[in-house]
Amino acid sequence: VTAGPTFEPIDPVRGLTNRSSGKQGYAIAAALADLGARVTLVSGPVALSAPPGVERVWVETAREMQAAVDAALPADIAVMSAAVADWRVDAVASGKLKKAPGGPPSLALIENPDILAGVSAPEARRPALVVGFAAETSDLEANARAKLSRKGCDWIVGNDVSDEVFGADANAVTLFTRDGGAENWPRQSKAEVARKLVARIVAHFA
Ligand code: C5P
């Protein structure tokens, strides 16, 4: 399970990040462990304690997250709920960038690896079930379905983030599956969303 944001440094004191409390991903890790799964939780910087029985691996950048996910394979199930920064700064400054009369610095960005797409690629170590997330502010279904095929995962948990979601304890999601299925789960606690998702996972393997 991946959770939380990644943090991509600009210089020793600044960085690029995403809004993510990690609550939904941590709840999923907890729900999986409650049912006896051996869980590795690859977590970006968040202010949450590790759920009991879960092995947590701290990471900061997308590339560190990718390496930690790789080290956690093989696995039967991958749930990628992290809000990974799409870009990182190409040349991280070794000292703090200073305000200067010439104006602000220009930051050249380069693309981060897509961890979910990498894990979903059809190779020997691909988990039997790969679940991604789609946080969207509009056109949830179209965007989630496009992500499902672009990334090659099996399910996408679609999340409308135009409402209060970040840092909140509740979430409303739709589960989109590769066979065209869509299940709406109305606003409920992130712990309940996690238990529902894990029950669906159990049913899938049964
Ligand atoms: O493309 P987008 O960021 O909207 O996709 C979201 C899904 O992809 C999430 O499951 C997220 O954890 C995953 N992702 C990833 N690596 C990236 C970008 C997104 O694993 N570099």
Image (cartoon, rainbow, N blue to C red):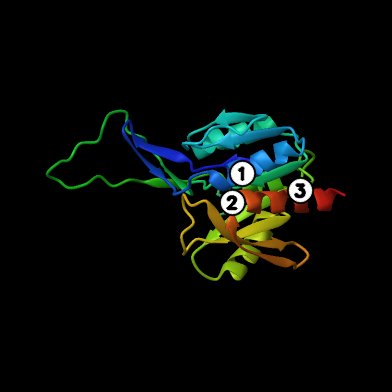
**Which one is earlier in the sequence, the residue at label 1 or at label 3?**
1
Residue 38, given in percent of the width and then of the height, sits at: 74, 32
Q: Crowding near pointer 1: few (<14 within 10 Å), some, many (20+)?
A: many
Q: Choose between 27 and 107: the one closer to the eye.
A: 27
Instruction: Name the residue rendered at 52%, 32% in the picture.
Output: 59
Q: Is residue 141 left or right of residue 9?
A: right
Can residue 118 be seen in the rendering of this structure? Answer: no
Q: Is residue 105 left or right of residue 156?
A: left
Q: Choose between 196 and 56: the one closer to the eye.
A: 196
Label 2 is placed on what type of residue?
Lys
| Residue pointed to by mark 3 | 129
Q: Crowding near pointer 2: few (<14 within 10 Å), some, many (20+)?
A: many
**Which one is earlier in the sequence, the residue at label 3 or at label 2?**
3
Label 3 is placed on what type of residue?
Leu
Count of picture labels:
3
Label 2 CB less than 8 angstroms from ligand 1: no
Separation of residues labelled 2 and 1 (CA atoms): 7 Å
Residue 8, given in percent of the width and then of the height, sits at: 42, 39
Considering the numbered disc 2 on the image, is that residue within a helix, a strand or a loop?
Answer: helix
Mark carried by residue 190: 2
Q: Crowding near pointer 3: few (<14 within 10 Å), some, many (20+)?
A: some
Label 1 is placed on what type of residue?
Ala
Instruction: Name the residue rendered at 74%, 43% in the picture.
Output: 77
Relative vertical location of residue 76 with respect to residue 183 in this rendering, above or below: above
Relative vertical location of residue 204 with respect to residue 142 in this rendering, above or below: above
Instruction: Name the residue rendered at 60%, 30% in the picture.
Output: 56
Mark carried by residue 27: 1
**Which one is earlier in the sequence, the residue at label 2 or at label 1?**
1
Relative vertical location of residue 42 with respect to residue 205 in this rendering, above or below: above
Considering the numbered disc 1 on the image, is that residue within a helix, a strand or a loop?
Answer: helix
